[in-house]
Amino acid sequence: MSEDRILALRRQLNQYNYEYHVLDHPTVSDAEYDQLMRELITLEQQHPELFDPNSPTQRVGGQVLEEFNKITHKRPMLSLGDVFNKEELFEFARKAEAEVGPVEYCCECKIDGLAMSLNYQGGRFQYAVTRGDGVVGEDVTHNVRTIKSIPMEIEYEGELEVRGEVYMPKASFERLNQKRRENGEEEFANPRNAAAGSIRQLDSKVAASRGLDALWYHVPQGPQLGHHQHSESLDFIHSLGFRINPLNRLCRNIEEVWQFVEELTLMRSDLPYEIDGIVIKVNDYEKQQQLGFTAKTPKWAIAYKFPAEEAVTRLENIFVTV
Ligand SMILES: CC(C)(CNC(=O)c1ccc(Oc2ccccc2)cc1)c1ccc2c(N)nc(N)nc2n1
């Protein structure tokens, strides 16, 4: 029966997407994947009554919007306070530990992309919304659907929100600017601008061509799922089929956090994506609750920011030309 075949093909192709884009471990050849996809496209054309926006066939884009709708976040997407050196970082830790005693920290790369919130209901992807001003963002569902490492179906029946960063890998950025140079178009200044420009395309075929990816780090339901960011929350997000950053690290104290900062400072240029800092979070949710928030930012998390690279490059140029 065609409907059974369509549902089976969708499940199978979603599984192959997960293996290829999340596990980096495909179990079928591209040829076999393409053949199944062609079969599903044909069957869906014969059965328009079975159209499903979450079908694997819809991930290549094709929807062109007139404008972006706005969506109000169910919970605010908070911003982070910044620190710029070791002294300020240690002061952040001293203040937190003065209030709640010794704490462990979860350290995560601060990917230089754009913050995104995904909504799922009944195990199915519903919409994606940008951070915007933290309260209201733009509905970019049609473009986020083309990011193949984002699952369209998850094993979670209730309503779930997952937050993270959509970004353009350095390799995609180089390819895109190479193409723009060849077409005499203006190049993007950096991967962050390129990602923001791509996710704000009204034509999802353009977004689909940009090689965007995403990494996830927050579920507002976190405290209901366990007691720590690392690793219950991160493991939960990963178990649902989302990509999380393997570089996330649990640090037993602020000295270990500083070791991690020094390590990442050295390896930053070799990463496949740009980072503009490291996010350091008090790992225990009860202690996060005790520390609370300022007007706009958590008192239990901080962003350690790297010195801006282009500034360093410019200085080098000045010395070189002199
Ligand atoms: C820590 C948090 C701000 C997420 N947390 C939240 O957004 C958040 C939001 C409401 C919360 O609780 C409230 C619930 C209702 C009202 C107010 C707060 C708790 C956390 C954040 C922000 C940016 C991040 C980034 N660029 N990279 C990584 N790796 N992690 C990041 N983490």
Image (cartoon, helix red, strand yellow):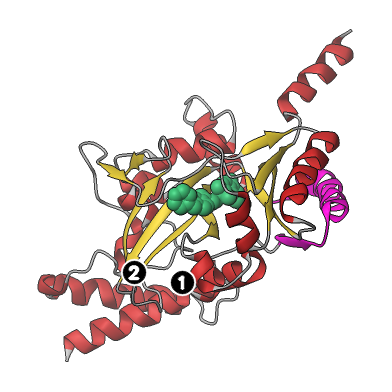
Q: Is residue 242 visible?
A: no
Seen from the viewer's position, the closer of residues 137 and 177 is: 137
Q: In the image, what residue occupies the spot 49% across and 70% down?
A: 224
Element carrying mark 2 = helix
Q: Amino acid at mark 2?
A: Pro
Which stretch is magenta? 247-274
Task: Using the rendered view, name the quadrant where residue 276 is placed.
Answer: top right
What is the chief secondary structure element of the magenta stretch? helix
Up the image or down, 58 lies above or below 194; here it is below
Q: Residue furthest front?
A: 99
Image quadrant containing the N terminus: bottom left
Q: Which residue is mark 2?
A: 56
Residue 86 pos. (x, y %): 84, 38
SS assignment at label 1 = helix
Residue 153 shows up from this direction: yes
Q: Which of 256/140 is in front?
A: 256
| Residue found at the far bottom of this picture | 1
Q: Position of residue 15 (x, y in %)?
A: 44, 79
Residue 179, relative to residue 44: is it above or below? above
Verify whether residue 187 appears in magenta: no
Q: Which residue reaches farthest left? A: 49
Q: Which mark is residue 17?
A: 1
In the rendered image, residue 269 lying in the magenta stretch gets the answer yes
Q: Residue at x 49, y 41 (%)?
A: 195
In contact (CB < 8 Å): disc 1 and disc 2: yes
Which kind of residue does numbered mark 1 sit on?
Asn
Residue that lies at the very extreme toward the top in this rendered image:
322
